[in-house]
Image: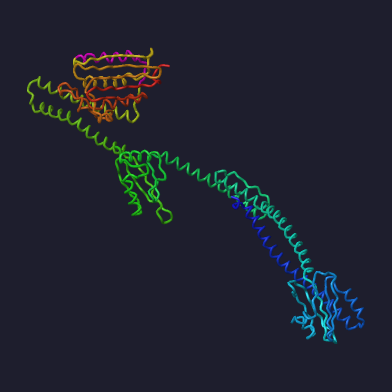
Amino acid sequence: MFWRSVVVKLWFTILLLVCFVLIILTVLLLQFFENFHVNKAEEEMLRTATVVSTLIDSEQRQDIIRSTTDTVKSASSHVLVVRGNGQSWKAESNSGEFKELQKQWFEQDEELARVITGGTEVKKVASADGRKFLAVGSPLSGDNGAVFVYKPLDSVEETTQQTTKTVFLGAGIAIVLTTIFAFFLSTRITAPLMKMRKGAFELSEGEFHTKIPIITHDEIGELAIAFNRMGRQLKQNIDALNQEKEQLSGVLKSMADGVITLNHKRKILVTNPPAKQLLQSWRYEEELEEEELPSPLHELFESVITEEREAMTEVTVQGRNWVIIMTPLYSNTTIRGVVAVLRDMTEERRLDKLRKDFLANVSHELRTPISMMRGYSEAIVDEVATTKEEKNELAQIILEESERMGRLVNELLDLARMESGNIQLHKEPVDVNLFLDRIVNKFQGVAEETGVKLLHERSGLPAGTVSIDSDRIEQVVTNLLDNAIRHTPENGSVHVHLHGGEDHFEIKVEDTGAGIPEEDLPFIFERFYKGDKSRKRAPSEEKQGTGLGLAIAKNIVEAHKGKISVQSKEGEGTTFYIYLPVENLPK
């Protein structure tokens, strides 16, 4: 964590660079000062040797030469004068720490011996008895002698050590000042960057109102301006994307068709509610896992990816018909996925079937009476019936069949008018108790003739009247009672129950007949439905119907903003419910 900080990295880099420069500079300075002090001492000693040599050449008195030599040389220096005639004398140092050197040592040294033999000046760092010293030699003019000046190197090293201490002290002060300056500079430079980092984290979390303060007008200031501009632009782009996403989501949710988007790995990316319901039903039917694609979708996907063109198929899932149209999605020239549109064609298929069934049923219903009317009419025309009684009987049959045809046509017209929404209700105040009593009493005779017990009960209905179209509601109840009595065996019973409350009233017609098969229940209110399989009585006793009564009853009840429903168990009986809402009750 420590090394991940920009402040520490910048501070450490500056400090390391300065330390590296200071180390190199210190080494060079120490080398320079060491050489400088040695050269300085050698030059000083050479000047001393030159002065002594000049003095010897110009002065004859030995005592003056010795006193002058003691005055000229430094306190730590030794002077050895070697004359050409082999004589020599010394001017000793005031310090007794350094052992004096004899003339033979200088004569044996190759470099210093050249001063005597070659007459050249010599400077060198020599060593004797394990100690280093500086030695210089200057030749005497007009004589094969020389003046040697030498002193220990300790004095020069002491000066160098003092200089080294000074250099190290300066370097330490420079490092301390550099540390403070580098830390200040790094924090000064990185403070805006840290604010930008914080702002970047806030942007990543969706806080697009974050602004970076512009402190300076250098590159960092320009970076802050660019960051703020980027934040504003990013907010505009995100808002535009969210708006488009909401629009797309709203469009998908409002679509009646299902939409599924898959990537090239067959992973579902987008679905809308109809598609989700279909996938759930599909997976339940094929016993698939949550992420698995149904086999028809899988095959269609492979076809679209392979052929790179739109494909279509039709499937049946849980009794419903679906048409699937799948289209490839491109990223430049590469297919990145597919989009599938799933259209529920169940209602269209059902309407097609109803239309075909309607034509077949109408043709069937009209064919019988027309055939009978034609046959009996031909019998009369061909004088097959010779007596008046026979002709009247045939005419009566023709009349009944014509009435049956008229009733069928009228019911078809009524049903068409109701389904188109053109039904007109003539509502009037009706005492529902008296209204239902009158209808039940009308069927008492029919029920007694067929051996069916007809019962009438009521409960919970408030006193007063309700506003209904009495003729239409009577048509509904009459149809239900007629069906219940006709399809209830002898010694059975039909119960008419009236129940009311504060917000509704309900008429229930319950019989103990043979019931309706479970597979026929969803179609009980469709046109031309007849429960011949389970509810048909003997042909001699059955009153033939058109199969439109329950379809008309449903439209009448729904026109009153009510509901009609049925419950039945085969072999136990059937119960119809008529529910009318509160708006039909008195205030």
Q: What are the residue bounds of the magenta stretch?
A: 426-448
Residue placed at 8% from the left, 28% from the top? Answer: 382
Asked which quadrant contains residue 442, the reply is top left
Identified at 92% across, 78% down, the residue is: 64
Total numbered circles: 0
Say if the magenta span includes residue 458: no
**Taken as a whole, is the magenta stretch helix, strand or loop?**
helix
Q: Nearer the viewer, residue 439 or 30?
A: 30
346 with respect to 363 (left or right): right
In front of the other: 463 or 572: 572
**Does 435 appear in magenta?**
yes
Q: 251 or 275: which is nearer to us?
A: 275
Query: How far across and down, in percent of the image, does residue 274 sit?
Result: 38, 39
**Image x and y of residue 520, in percent:** 25, 30
Viewed as shown, does residue 1 lie left or right of 147? left
Q: Quadrant of the C terminus?
A: top left
- Counting from the top left corner in percent of width and height, residue 173 is at 74, 57
Residue 379 location (% of width, % of height): 10, 27
Instruction: In this rendered view, identify the residue nearer to me: 584 or 159.
Output: 159
User: Relative to 453, does residue 83 appear above or below in the rendering?
Assistant: below
Q: Is residue 83 left or right of residue 10?
A: right
Please say if 275 is above or below 120: above
Which residue shows up at 45% across the image and 43% down it?
Answer: 248
The color scheme shown is: rainbow
